[in-house]
Amino acid sequence: MTQQQPAKSSPPATTRRVALGKLLAVGGAVFIPAWNETIEAADSITCVPTTPTVTEGPYWVDEKLFRSDIRTDPSNGSVRQGVLLKVVINVQNLSSSGCTPLAGAYVDIWHCDAKGIYSDEPTYNPGGGTGSVNTVGQKFLRGYQISDENGRVEFTSVYPGWYTGRTIHIHLRVRTYNGSTVLSNFVSQIFFSEEINDLVMAQSAYTRTSARNTTNANDNIYRVTNQERMMSTTTGSVSEGYTSAITVGAAFQTPTTSAPAISNGGVVNAVSGASSIAAGSWVSIYGSNLAAAARALQASDLSGNSLPTSLGGTSVQINGKAAFLQYVSPTQINVLAPDDASVGSVNVTVANANGTSNAATANLQAFSPALSVLSGYVRALRAADSAIVNGTGTAETGYKVTAAVGPGEVISLFGTGFGPTSSSIAAGQNFNGAYPTNNPVTVSIGGQPATVLWAGLIGPGLYQINVTVPASLSDGDHSVIATVGSVSSSSSAVVKVLASAKLASFFHRGRSVVAAARRGPAKLPTRHFAWMQHVLHSTQTGAFEVPTGCLVQLA
């Protein structure tokens, strides 16, 4: 089926909140967001008092895991269970003259799971009937992020449990570097109100054979001067999850050099945050001094019919080839990887007016499949009524939204990194049409095979997969995994399935939906959806907010 070309449009006007996930429709092309960042324009900030420095404790391991969703164990993809928790940390650099947001800092967090268990630790007993555990080699509930221009990082985790002798807490470390030299190394902890602690500990995932013996009131680490500076502000609910926010203030040393620097592990799949990348897929690069200022792609930046290889004075080389830029900022760059038949370890560099960065290592593979998700749920379109399936039912002004899809219904998934297609379109080129993947794409939902009706490239680096949800799935959240070339997407993406959702749209189109899906994609003829700005990935990495209708939709 021929893909209709959307009307040309100018980039949306810049507002106070500028989402990296902004899509820009130019000449029929769709440009792709970063996986886990939303940049807010810097505002005047209120300086906070100094946050206490406290012990790192016995369970610190410098895993160097660059990721924002820390729930999974990278060794096997398993997800730690518990009440969902989003952790928002703002870091201020305090001085005698005031304070400034600390950009480019490495912010680590680590904490125990619902049963009081830390990862990557030799045999020990957390208490509460857990017994002795050994988690050596596991890396759940650990990770770091690089603070953005506003000193902000976000993590998705689960609410921590407790272990003998300690109240409920999260460990925090903030480091600044000059190259590989550590300039500042600040360690503290994050605490929660006992009212919320009690609500969470009453949930089944946190059940122990004995009650916790330490609260904030008698915790030796919390009982310090200015302890309130370690208390987070937490909102939400047990059922929907919590968001805990804290502002950390301390005096940090910062590097005097202005040359760009790519962070260790700072080249990742832009959709999933995975360490592998693929030719023609979307990639995010993290570091410091990467660009002079935040700058998003505009229509005037296009070079002929191609995305630019330089934006705001910044350029990127992947394996010696120029990448195509969609967004640059001092701490993050989004690029489309160039065509390259190589596989294995390759060098990535960033260049700007201040010089060329260190050569960071990236793992270039033929496939690096990743599905668009927000708040842990795949961003999908339901074929029967063109509704956005977002897992939560949260309203998106101007669009029909559903939290769930019914068993047996057809949906479209979106992502990047699914490999070569039937076209010879060069990476970075705008194009009309839709091109099937050369390699078969399979999808499982809830562990059951889902029939793939069509899979292919619909825009630069952007793929659409039309699938039928298995009819036998029960109500609930089910993992969605897409596989191509024996490489699978993350197992943490889920879709909400409810039988009642199918009843709402079952008679809308009937079997013609499946027939249309088998023919491939087609542009929505009645309107061109605008990009919907959103609250940055409130519960999970992968805020690849594609399918709001700006993309390809079933006929």
Image: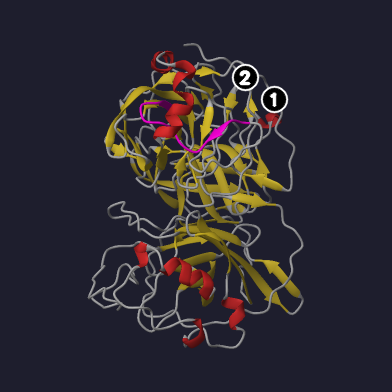
Residue in the image at 24% along x and 72% along y: 133
Q: What is the crowding at mark 1: few (fewer than 14 residues within 10 Å), some, or many (at least 20)? A: some
Queried whether the magenta region covers residue 405, the answer comes back as yes
**Farthest-out residue, top:** 1
Q: Amino acid at mark 2?
A: Pro
What residue is disc 2 on? 6
Q: Which residues are magenta?
A: 399-411
Q: Main secondary structure of the magenta part?
A: loop
- Residue 9 is labelled as 1
Considering only vertical position in the picture, is 462 above or below 254? Answer: above
Q: Amino acid at mark 1?
A: Ser
> How far apart are the two marked residues, 2 and 1, measured between alpha carbons?
9 Å
* Nearer the observer, 350 or 242: 242
* Element at label 1: loop
- The percent coordinates of residue 511 (x first, y second) are 40, 15
- Residue 272 is labelled as none
- Badge 2 vs badge 1, beta-carbon distance below 8 Å: yes
- The percent coordinates of residue 107 (x first, y second) are 52, 66
Considering only vertical position in the picture, is 432 above or below 96? Answer: above
* Nearer the observer, 331 or 224: 224
Residue in the image at 60% along x and 60% along y: 152
- The percent coordinates of residue 316 (x first, y second) are 54, 43
* Nearer the observer, 70 or 494: 494
Is residue 555 something one can see in this rendering?
A: yes
The quarter of the picture where residue 214 lies is: bottom left
* Nearer the observer, 384 or 332: 384
